[in-house]
Amino acid sequence: MCLGIPGELIAFHDDPPDLATVDVSGVRRKINIALLAEEELRPGDWVLVHVGFAMSRISESEARAVLDFLEEMGPAYDDELAALRDSARDSARDEGELLALRDSMRAGLNPDDLRALRD
Amino acid sequence: MRYVDEYRDAGKARALAARIAGLCEPGRTYRLMEVCGGHTHTIYKHGLEDHLPEAVELVHGPGCPVCVIPMGRVDDAIAIAAEPDVIMTSFGDMMRVPGGNGSFLDAKAAGADIRMVYSPLDALKIARAEPDRRVVFMGIGFETTAPSTAMTVKRAAAEGLANFSVFCNHVMIIPAIKAILDSPDLRLDGFLGPGHVSTVIGCRPYEFIARDHGRPLVCAGFEPLDVLQAVYLAMRQLAEGRAEVENQYARVVPWDGNPVALRAIGEVMEPRPYFEWRGLGIISHSALRMRDTYAQHDAERIFDLPGVRVADPKACQCGEVLKGVLKPWECKVFGTACTPETPIGTCMVSSEGACAAYYNFGRFSRERFRETSAP
């Protein structure tokens, strides 16, 4: 949690904004990149990810060094990576739901109405 | 993996250790505190203490946010989780931290709906999916995780997710270092600054340590050579009579930190007048709470909390370990009553805690060292 996990930026998503897909040790998930708004990020760049948010941009060699360090930490990193993997699985499932939420917000419905609709 | 070996070269490590030894004044001892649990881990794992001259001692600091959560706050969180319509969400690190009446895991076994999440955004997802339940996120961590919690709260507010709130236990590293510097029972000559916390806060906030306390601080990376090089830089300052903030980890830590992240924290949270730290006691302006603007997402205002201060178990000496007064193996219950499987104190719960790191790695290298150096 306190140590960031390096991820490689794969693709950016404008919609919803501030999201990017990263590859973390072979696990792909969407993370929030709003906190790096002042950096010019490109696919192939590496970032340190803390609990789902990219917090700083790093070089590839640094990314390898941090990954190596984390892998050595054993259980702590395994747990975090497992949590990330599980959460990535959920993200895929929830994507449809997010899109529905976005579309309805565009259509001018407020979230309470949406909830009523879903119930 | 050429780049990694670069930070591990045994020849370079020996050369650095020799240069460090060359900086020691005869008859003087040096105590340097590594603030971050990640550094503690590297030090034990690679037996770095064995490479350093005897006059240089590394002291483990309070840099593990799980370790410093007092028992009373765990009890408060469990009281929230016990409400029938509540889903409590938390990072996995927090699950085994004991309160006065057990841990999240115990409460979960007793029927509370407590779920592990990887990110506060995952907690937000649960809130969207379960509009009839009140979803509470247990916000813990230093400045590395506080911006994520803040961004998530802003998102919840923007979406009008009234069933999402945060139980805010975020803490700040600078007041903790201040408290340690003011502690009368501890003499320190300098600090190794945390790596990833500093990516957010930058190096500037440490300047008071050099200016007001005359101690060097060197922000350090996590590889063995990073730590040794940071020790060398701090020792060189001491030898030359300087006290400055230096950045050994400039390849990751920008001098000014991450301004966007700092703004996010400041927009959503404000310093509490005071907060209790396990082991360090009550420290003023050392933790964050939600601003009035976000009152509707503040679990502390939504729920009635017991708010009872619970003293740490008598046998537990986490306080002394967190302040660096005791080494893990000097604690009365270390490795006997208190192990990673059945932790009494928080330093043994979290893998970033000094006791767990020492239990898992350090004691072996220490024993090895003793065997090889025995006549």
Image (cartoon, coloured by chain):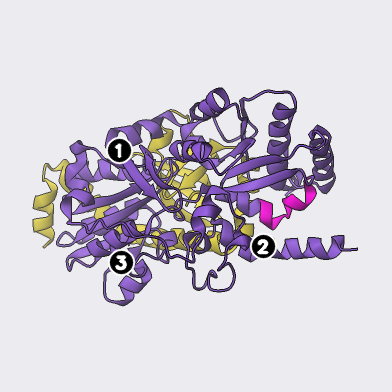
Disc 3 and disc 2 on one polypeptide chain: yes
Residue B357 in the image: x percent, y percent? 60, 59
Q: Mark 2 lies on which chain?
A: B
Does the magenta run of residues contain B45?
A: yes
Q: Is mark 3 on a helix, strand or loop?
A: strand
Q: Which residue is drawn at 42% across and 63% down?
A: B97
Q: Is residue B3 visible?
A: no
Q: What residue type is labelled 3?
A: Ile
Q: Which mark is residue B273?
A: 1
Chain identifier for the purple-coloured part of the image: B
Q: Which amino acid does label 2 sit on?
A: Phe
Answer yes or no: do the residues labelled 1 and 3 have beta carbons within 8 Å?
no
Q: Which amino acid does label 1 sit on?
A: Pro
Q: Nearer the viewer, mark 1 or mark 3?
A: 1
Answer yes or no: do the residues labelled 2 and 1 have beta carbons within 8 Å?
no
Side of A20 relative to A7 (left or right): left
Which residue range is magenta in the image? Answer: B43-52
Q: Mark 3 lies on which chain?
A: B
